Image (tube, helix red, strand yellow):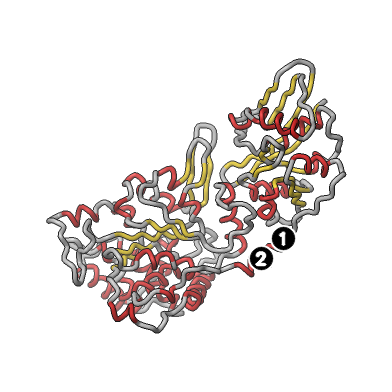
Amino acid sequence: MLTKTFGSAVQGVNAYTITIEVVVSQGTGFFVVGLPDNAIKESQQRVEAALKFRGYRMPRTKVVVNMAPADIRKEGSAYDLPIGLGILHASQQLVTERLADYVIMGELALDGELRPIKGVLPIAIQARKEGFKGLILPRENAQEAAIVNSLDVIPVGTMQEAVDFLEGRLEIAPVVMDTRDVFRQAANQYEADFADVQGQENIKRALEIAAAGGHNVIMIGPPGAGKTMLAKRLPGILPALNMQEALETTKIHSVAGRLGANASLIHTRPFRSPHHTISDVALVGGGSNPQPGEISLAHNGVLFLDELPEFKRTVLEVMRQPLEERRVTIARAKLSIEFPANFMLIASMNPCPCGYYNHPEKECVCGPGVVQRYLNKVSGPLLDRIDLHVEVTPVTFDQMAETRRSEDSRTIQHRVAEARQRQTARFAEFPDIHSNALMPSQMVKDICRIDAAGLTLLKTAMERLGLSARAYDRILKVARTIADLAAADNIELPHLAEAIQYRSLDREGWAG
């Protein structure tokens, strides 16, 4: 007897429906075909143990499981449940006509209980797209799948519950969630607030500009100056996630298995802070079964690289393309997978190995040339993609003892959101450009025009401060963002002057 059940394979952040055909016939042996990995081949032992534990029998004849289409590689233990139900139906231990209505996924324990799986959100989206009535899956994944409306999400705790539901002996109410209501209630809730930071008003201003224009930032300062504390509060002043961004972010975290049990929609912007010992594959993604890396997990949020020069050079260099294209393409012999990677890069570093170069009170003990060699660990092409260079100085005792609280994140976020709205209107005809930081060079010339006085100021600054040629476009982009924050139609001299000061590392002899 031939039985068909339906599962799903996840590649990148998209899912593809898999037809699982089971035939029980004369002969002996258990065969799984259709490009399965070892975890699927081992399903025989899990399925057989679960069937016996629940009082069913494993056919002692020939069992063939075909997973179509055969040119898509299937991986993981999430196919245990559809294979088990297919065997029961093919051996006439399960009598139902409802198998074709549902996509079924779940990993079986030896006692027939179900364990949660990864990638449920893209699976649910694809199931609805292909017109399935519903999705049968482990109970812990139900909230995540319920994000997708117009789809019956049937949570089951054991294989027996799935059998009883399909045969009509057990009624299981579909999990229903008002996604927009949950999103409205939970959106924009961050524990860290800029009101906690005493002093550092100039750094807060720089981060506000960065948030308003989507600019990348590098902070240079001695240990204990507050670089990490400030970076962790940046997501709280970014514009709130919209529903589309929340779905994109949740899909990536779902595929990576980072949502956890009973999780649903991600409602705050991600903040990823990998250690400097990270490998290039862990940062950008990849592996034999390509998985999203840290830069994709930071999609629509912030990637914070602390102690930037301590990262391996190869790790930093692989970020250059994603910073430009806002996506990562992982190519293999048989497939090419694309992960989104639209993130803000926030980096921090000490000015020298000892950390006290240019310190107002402590003396640097680094020898001649050591400071320059340390700064040279960050390559010019990478630095070229960072718009704001900010020097961070230690907070004084008087500032730390100040009892008056600083401006909170919500107030700053309101100004940032207004500036982003102006940019949205400006780039309405360009679907791939959402902020000033994404403007190509030709667009900078058209949009970031300055008058004769501005040109004179910029020329003088570049000559006197020894700014490099790459600083020119960056200064104009940042000046446009400062003008947006000020609700100004044109870039004025004060906007340009403020933008110029955010190019510390472009100054010739900065470390000389």
| Front residue (pair 328, 35) | 35
> What's the amino acid at mark 2?
Val
Real-space Cα separation, disc 1 to disc 2, in angstroms: 8 Å
Q: Quadrant of residue 188?
A: bottom right
> What's the amino acid at mark 1?
Met
Residue 182 image label: 2
At x 30% / y 59%, what residue is drawn? 349
Q: Position of residue 243 (x, y in %)?
A: 62, 63
* Rendered view: 38 above or below 125: above
* Rendered view: 493 above or below 239: below
Q: Is residue 96 left or right of residue 248?
A: right
| Front residue (pair 424, 46) | 46
At x 45% / y 60%, what residue is drawn? 302
Q: Quadrant of residue 496?
A: bottom left
| Front residue (pair 215, 150) | 150
Q: Is residue 373 left or right of residue 482?
A: left
Q: Assign the N terminus to one quadrant of the image.
A: top right
Query: Could you tell me if the residues under marks 1 and 2 are in contact, i.e. CB atoms within 8 Å?
Result: yes
* Rendered view: 230 above or below 71: below
Residue 356 image label: none
Packing grade of label 1 (10 A; few <14, some 14-19, many >=20) is: some
SS of the residue under disc 1:
loop
At x 87% / y 44%, what residue is drawn? 169
Q: Position of residue 66 (x, y in %)?
A: 70, 28
Residue receiving disc 1: 177
